[in-house]
Amino acid sequence: MKIVVIGGSGLIGSKLVNSLLQLGHTVIPASPQYGIDTITGEGLGEALKGADVVVDVSNSPSFEDRAVLGFFKRSTVNILTAAIYAGVKHHVAISVVGADRLPDSGYLRAKIAQEELIKESGIPYTILRSTQFFEFAGRIAEAATIGDEVYISPAGFQPIAADEAVSALAEIAVNAPTNDTVEIAGPVCMPMYEFIRYYLTEIEDSRQLVMDEHARYFGAELTDESLVPGETALLGKIKYEDWFQKQLETT
């Protein structure tokens, strides 16, 4: 099976490329680094020639509302157009658990726009909505920092190891499209505040953590239901504390 991974040089994309190669598939990592640009269309048609599946795990270089919406719309239209021309049989994309519940977030509005374009394209599809990855705790803390204080919501949060999201994506990619949306999350729901507290404590970060119900995440205030998956979600097995300690052991 020939599978094209859009965003194939990023955290999720590079892991997915390796996973699919290990399963014996022909895999094309697609990103500007490899001369394939979904915004300009450069190299895209050639990459998709003869492809059975395209998996889009790309992300916008800017999270500013207008820029991120423009990125996902243009990129997705270009991918879908090239995929239709190439006769691709399955379009897979990664999205975000709770994207439809946080309309105040420009980033998540852009992800919903991406999902709608995929659903309306006529290409058989599967969308995997994932919770946030363990790997991005530092980025969340950095985005929430004002001076020496880190303002974090106490809302429910169920992060997952990137490797487990990648495993789900690989399984989806090599199987028949569902024409549906699947959710995946980590095994433990916790307050986002506790997730970041653990991270800051373990790296001995001196910034003061502030619990703030009005703290924004991707531009939106959260409730306990905002980022938590439904009852039918796939659940990973790796707990954050165990994952984090393993990272410390390998560095």
Image (spheres, rainbow, N blue to C red):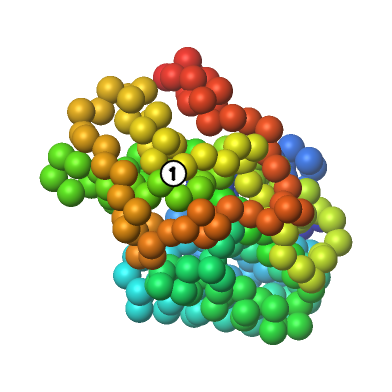
Q: Secondary structure at mark 1?
A: helix
For residue 94, above or below residue 117: above
The residue at the point 76 percent across, 83 percent down is 122
Q: Position of residue 237 (x, y in %)?
A: 68, 33
Q: Categorize mark 1 by other alpha carbons within 10 Å: few (<14), some (14-19), many (20+).
A: many
Q: Quadrant of residue 199?
A: top left
Residue at left 56%, top 62%?
Answer: 98
Residue under the image location 73 percent in, 53 percent down = 231
Point out the residue furthest to the top here.
Answer: 249
Give the farthest residue toward the right. 176
Count of marks, rendered view: 1
- Of residues 76 and 203, the one nearer the viewer is 203
Image quadrant holding the C terminus, namely: top left
- Residue 7 can be seen, yes or no: no
Q: Nearer the viewer, residue 134 or 217?
A: 217
In which quadrant of the rendered image does the N terminus lie? bottom right
What residue sits right under mark 1 in the picture? Answer: 192
Q: In the shown orientation, is residue 190 left or right of residue 178?
A: left
**Residue 120 appears in the rendering:** yes
| Occupied quadrant, residue 221 | bottom left
Picture residue at 27% right of the left edge, 37% below the top:
209
Q: Residue 105 in the image: x percent, y percent? A: 41, 69
Q: Is residue 205 left or right of residue 63?
A: left
What kind of residue is marked 1? Met
The percent position of residue 36, horizontal first and vertical second, equals: 52, 65
